[in-house]
Image: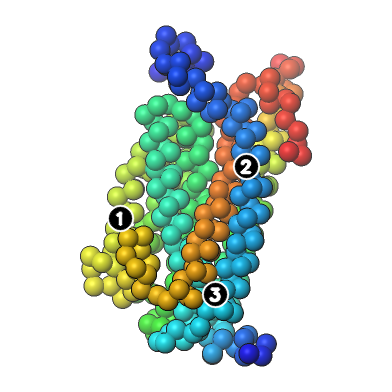
Amino acid sequence: MNSESRITGDESRPATRWLWFYKLASPPHAYRLLGLWRPWLLWPAVVLMLIGVYGGLMLAPPDYQQKDAFRIMYVHVPSASLSLMVYVMMAVAAAIGVIWRIKLAHAVAAACAPIGAWFTVLALVTGSIWGKPMWGTWWEWDPRLTSELILLFLYLGYMALRASFDDVQRADRASAILAMVGVVNVPIVKYSVVWWNSLHQGPSISLLKKSAIDGSMVWPLLLLLLAFVLYFGAVLCTRVRAEILRRERNTAWLSQIDAKS
Amino acid sequence: MSLGEFLHMGGYAPYIWSCYGLTMAVLIGMEWASRRDLKAAQLQARRRTQTAGNP
């Protein structure tokens, strides 16, 4: 079971049309490319965040029911969305890593976990702070809240499992199973407010239907959502680069890395 | 709207500002931690390549 064999092309047939992919996914290439992409993700994210926060705090009118408290939505909803998106990405990357034995995919999965865990913490804490004035309680064992808490435990379990192995490849394989099994929790979080009678409100924006909130309130939210996605991309670039270095045993290119880059 | 009114947030100031402050802190913290992580990995990699030369 040598995962190197495909990448180095020992086998007669990883079809030549996939060569570009193996080249792209090779550690030196990926390391360099991720470093190049990063600023193009980070700075647009910062600019969009500033505009989005300005729109959310200054331009959007107070909600007719929640008054100014609804402004918590602008940080709560993007955090919660990212907590789910990052998990899906982690599970898909882990699956690709297991099925096609691509080390870079495992590196991406490992890099996703701490970021996703922090977004989950943000979603839980900002939700709790929002819940106090609106529902009169910091916490309720409600389907949405409980499943989001389980999401946090999945992230933490994934990281703890990885940390329990000395060997990176064994850590990759074992943690990938957990990531893939845990993905069943994602639709439960997402549709909990639809399937069960939840204290948490239902979705206000949707890709398919007309938004339930006014345009003046929704554009800062969409902007912040995009900003969070770009920000995630930027942090992911840095973390994947670190993961690549930790896995690499080919010292020829490692010795050429500039500490400043 | 005066600055005082803006900061007051219709009485929800503690809730709103704590949420925004916390989010900002976590976002800045994650960026900082990821850079530190990369630096550590680079240092580790360099040490590995140096020791690989002289067994």
Residue to which mark 3 is pinned:
A56
In the image, residue A238 sits, relative to residue A23, either above or below, namely: below
**Subunit that carries the residue with mark 3:** A
The image position of residue A36, as x and y in percent, is 66, 39
- Identified by mark 3, the residue type is Gly
Quarter of the image for residue A185 reads bottom left
Q: Residue at x 52, y 69 (%)?
A: A220
Q: Is residue A19 above or below residue A211?
A: above
Give the Cα separation between the discs numbered 1 and 2. Answer: 31 Å
Other-residue count near label 1 (Cα within 10 Å), few / some / many at <14 / 14–19 / ≥20 = few
Closer to the eye: label 1 or 2: 2
Amino acid type at image mark 1:
Pro
Q: Quadrant of the C terminus of chain A?
A: top right
Q: Which residue is mark 1?
A: A187
Q: Residues within 10 Å of mark 2 (few under 14, many from 20)?
A: few
Tell me if B31 is positioned left or right of B10 in this view: right
Q: Nearer the viewer, residue A251 or B54?
A: A251
Labels 3, 1: one chain: yes
- Name the residue type under label 2: Trp
The answer to whether A186 is drawn above or below residue B50 in the figure is below
**Neighbourhood count class around disc 3 (C-alpha, 10 Å): few under 14, some 14–19, many 20 upward:** many
Between marks 3 and 1 in the image, the one whose residue lies nearer the viewer: 3
